[in-house]
Amino acid sequence: MLSIGDIQIYVTDFERALKFWAEGLGLRVAEKEVTAHSAYARLEFPDGGPALGLLAPADPWEPGTRPEPGSRPGIGFDIATSDFEDTLVRLIEFGGRQVGRIETYNDLRLVTIADPDDTTFDLLELPEEGEVDG
């Protein structure tokens, strides 16, 4: 058997990141541990799949030296939703930002989002249940 495990994201501000990922996407906090020196949370998607792990503290970039999102090597991943508009609004409301324009491929929308630590992912629109290519 070979499968992808949980995705770990290193964050500078644990509470801000937890709010962004849990409330912005509606993920369930399955596990959370905060000590004087570190913090960890495991967030589960409502429909299953790998979980997101938040690990803190990560050293922030030096002032004035933060590279643009997507300009350095990293991991790319998509988060798919059938509630594209509302999810995008919530992510921005909870500290994320849209990177570039919303693009359309095969009648589905896609946009890159940066979380509060500039970790980027693509928000991908899924068709509503019952929709069929025409």
Image: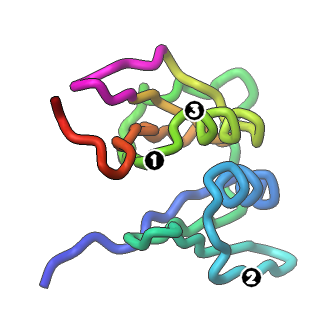
Label annotation for residue 44: none
In this picture, which residue range is highlighted in magenta?
Answer: 101-109
Please tell me which residue is depicted at 22% across the width and 25% down the height of the picture: 106
Work out how far the residue at label 2 is from the one at label 3, CA to CA, in angstroms. 32 Å
Q: Main secondary structure of the magenta part?
A: strand
Secondary structure of residue under mark 3: helix
Q: What amino acid does circle 2 point to?
A: Glu
Estimate the x, y position of residue 98 in percent, counting from the top left.
58, 25
Label annotation for residue 33: 2
Which residue position holds label 1? 81
Secondary structure of residue under mark 2: strand
Say which label, 2 or 1, has the lower sequence index: 2
In front: mark 2 or mark 1?
1
In front: mark 2 or mark 3?
3
Within the magenta stretch, is there residue 98? no
* 38 or 124, nearer to the observer: 124
Estimate the x, y position of residue 59 in percent, counting from the top left.
68, 51
Q: Is residue 10 above or below residue 46?
A: above
Relative placement, left or right, of 17 versus 9 is right
Estimate the x, y position of residue 99 in percent, counting from the top left.
53, 22
Q: Is residue 96 above or below residue 25?
A: above
Work out how far the residue at label 2 is from the one at label 1, CA to CA, in angstroms. 28 Å
Estimate the x, y position of residue 58 in percent, counting from the top left.
66, 56
Q: What amino acid does circle 3 point to?
A: Glu
Which residue position holds label 3? 85
Say which label, 2 or 3, has the lower sequence index: 2
Relative placement, left or right, of 3 versus 99 is left
